Image (cartoon, rainbow, N blue to C red):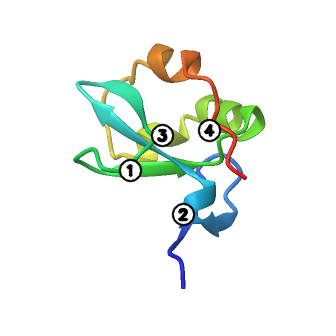
Amino acid sequence: MEPVRTCVGCRTRAPRSALLRVVAQNDTLIPDESAVLPGRGAWVHPTPDCIQAALRRRAFGRALRVTTQLDTRTFEQHPPRNKG
């Protein structure tokens, strides 16, 4: 059975393979395509709707337990991957 994670954008549960892992490094939000970067990760569907919802609600900061303001520019410029 594949691990299940919760999307921080839409709050629905989905298989880990259907989600994109995101980590914070030096207060910068970084997409972790291979899910191997160290540290706490947050999971989001790689769709514009879920990503925008998570950014709008500031869900990444809460999920990653970061108390400072996160720089999301790198993450926002990252094109969503299509997983099928």
Q: Earlier in the sequence, mark 3 or mark 2?
A: 2
Q: Which mark is residue 54?
A: 4
Disc 2 and disc 4: Cα gap in Å? 17 Å
Residue 28 location, x and y as percent?
34, 23
Q: Earlier in the sequence, mark 2 or mark 4?
A: 2
* Element under disc 1: loop
Query: Which residue sits at x=39%, y=24%?
Result: 70
Q: Are marks 3 and 2 in contact (CB under 8 Å)?
A: no
* Element under disc 2: helix
Residue to which mark 3 is pinned: 60
Q: Earlier in the sequence, mark 4 or mark 3?
A: 4
* Element under disc 3: helix
Please identify, in this view, whether the residue under mark 3 or under mark 1 is nearer the observer.
Answer: 1
Instruction: Farthest residue to the right: give it.
Output: 49
Disc 3 and disc 1: Cα gap in Å? 16 Å
Instruction: Farthest residue to the front: give it.
Output: 84
Which of these two is toward me, 60 or 39?
A: 39
Residue to which mark 2 is pinned: 16
Q: Which mark is residue 6?
A: none
Disc 2 and disc 1: Cα gap in Å? 10 Å
Residue 68 lies left or right of residue 76; in this view the side is: left
Q: Are marks 4 and 3 in contact (CB under 8 Å)?
A: yes
Residue 33 location, x and y as percent?
45, 41
Q: Which amino acid, by three-letter code, is at mark 3?
A: Phe
Query: Which residue sits at x=65%, y=66%?
Result: 14
Disc 1 and disc 4: Cα gap in Å? 19 Å
